[in-house]
Amino acid sequence: MEEAAPKPKRAVSSLCCLCNNRKAALKRPKTLQQICRECFYEVFEEEIHQVIVKNQLFRPGERIAVGASGGKDSTVLAYVLSELNQRHNYGLDLFLLSVDEGITGYRDDSLETVKRNEIQYGLPLQIVSYKDLYGWTMDEIVKMIGLKNNCTFCGVFRRQALDRGAALLKVDKLATGHNADDMAETVLLNILRGDIARLSRCTAIITGEDGPIPRCKPFKYTYEKEIVMYAYFKKLDYFSTECIYSPNAYRGFAREFIKDLERIRPRAILDIIKSGEDFRISTSTKMPEQGTCERCGYISSQKWCKACVLLEGLNRGLPKLGIGRSRGLDSEGKRETIGSNNVHTRSIESKQCGSLDF
Amino acid sequence: MDMTLILDFKCSGGLELLCNSVKIHNVSIDPENGVGKFIMKDLLSWVRSNLIKERPEMFMKGDTVRPGVLVLVNDCDWELSGQLDTTLEEKDVVVFISTLHGG
């Protein structure tokens, strides 16, 4: 459309629909509202506060570790939690907990970001490394096993590493930066894999209450777009590079599908989470029983925990040990793995970046 | 020949890796169709053929950015300014942020 004025009219001049005063800076995916930066900060933080209060994620006096990868989600989480802790007197002692997988050119750089965050937010940092815990770095593991299944090793090891780091810090709970997009993606993946046990618990906002360190997800309902916008507007210091080792293609497709849906109908993300929450698993479905690993004492539904099986393979030079996909749930899926352990393993894969696990 | 448009183009969130790891590009563009206005759609095809050095599918899907790539024009979400139809002017700052890397 031709405009008479020399400057073409732009839609950006629209006002924030909350304060009706300042210029709108973004469109909220959740509500489709056009809002300004200041109102955005307010609703963004307030919604997370409400999620924390409504779900009783924290109790006064608790020590809380934020799982910090240096990426956008955990950086924003650390920042927002320390803000809310002060503003609303949660009475929490906050810590940063990072895992050093030993990936040169990736994790060493992102850990530098976390070290800056430690200073910027004044939160003590604990780093636990695969090398110290398991005797292997991911670089060494990849050198031995190649670029297939490496994400399985990394995902399994990270879960335990975070628990061990949390124990070192003597925290009561671990808060992770999983966002609404991650949640929707995981619901979808668990359906695609027929993983009923995970499907039934993957949307829980607090998990592992029966285990050593419960975990919670304050960003469960927070859209990735808003997290990235928040980090951008606030100029938060975060690190964003893909892991240098091969990405998980299956998860990648699920993620892309979610993003395509979001573009057409942003609510889709919240609706998928809702579907995940409301699934009822029939009582005739057999669920794996939880016990402890005979070797290291970590929680496990098998004789040995997955990390011990994987480590045994690495140390014996049989890295395929424990990699086969078989689930104890359906008989046709029963497949014996190498060795005498007859361990039924379930595939655990992490987000492309390798920093998420459910 | 005073139709040359000078823009700042920034990419982050991992997208810079597709452009030789350069985050900030100061670019001058001569709109092909002469007098017509220059819109985001034109910029995207210009960026794709001039700045993206590898894996264009990480940046574009169809004739727009890949879902999960956020676009801001002068620090304003392009969803408020008409997305592909957003008109660009001299000295505008266009920011692309990928949300697809890292957590």
Image (cartoon, rainbow, N blue to C red):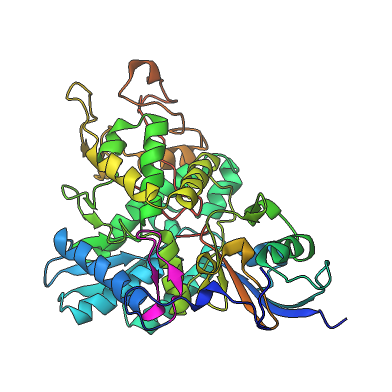
Percent across and percent down for residue B38 are: 72, 70
Left or right side of A134 for A240: right
Above or below B89: residue A220: above
Q: Give the range drawn in magenta.
A: A23-38
Q: Which of A3 and B67 is in front in this view?
A: A3
**Residue A32 falls within the magenta-colored stretch:** yes
Q: Where is residue A252 in the image (x, y as percent from the top left)?
A: 52, 45
Q: In this view, does A312 lie above or below B44?
A: above
In the rendered image, which quarter contains the N terminus of chain A? bottom right
Q: Quadrant of residue A9?
A: bottom right
Nearest to the observer: residue A164 or residue A269: A269
Residue farthest to the front, as pictured? A4
Residue A322 is left or right of residue B78, and the answer is: left
The verdict on residue A109 being magenta is no
Image position of A204 (left or right of B80): left
x and y percentages locating residue A262 in the rendered image: 45, 50
